[in-house]
Image (spheres, helix red, strand yellow):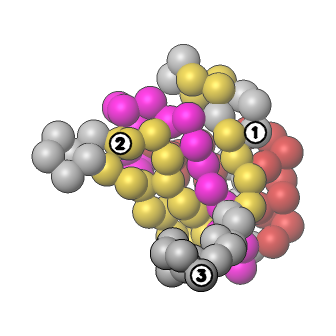
Amino acid sequence: MKKLFVGSLPPTTTEESLLALFSQFGTVRSIKLVKDLFSGKCKGFGFLEMEGHEARAAIAGLDGKSFEGNTLKVKYEEEQRGKGHKGRR
């Protein structure tokens, strides 16, 4: 199972529209669309989980492509380095 980052999403994006977009490359196991707390609109990015070969196909097919007027950024989620080490050393 691979986790994908999807960026540059328009505020009108819904989990259903993202599911429809990525389903053409395989089975989407989970979707987490990051939304504004007050308006409920998409903040411009989200995360999906797909099987490895399906995730690679989705990246190849959608990264840099237009979606509702925005150019998508699709890549593997990167582990955050140094998480929790924001203070002085």
Name the residue nearer the viewer: 65 or 8.
8
CA gap, disc 2 and disc 1: 19 Å
Q: Which residue sits at x=68%, y=74%?
A: 81
Q: Which residues are the magenta region?
A: 1-16
Mark 3 vs mark 1: in front: 3
Q: Which residue sits at x=41%, y=55%?
A: 33
Q: Which residue sits at x=36%, y=32%?
A: 11
Residue type pointed to by label 2: Cys
- Pick whichever of labels 2 and 3 is earlier in the sequence: 2
Residue type pointed to by label 3: Arg
- Tag shown at residue 89: 3
Tell whether label 1 touches label 2 (CB within 8 Å). no
- Pick whichever of labels 2 and 1 is earlier in the sequence: 2
Where in the figure is residue 63, as x and y percent of width and height?
75, 39
Q: Which residue sits at x=38%, y=42%?
A: 43
CA gap, disc 3 and disc 1: 38 Å
Tell whether label 3 touches label 2 (CB within 8 Å). no
Identify the residue position indicated by label 1 in the image: 63
Where in the figure is residue 35, as x and y percent of width and height?
31, 50
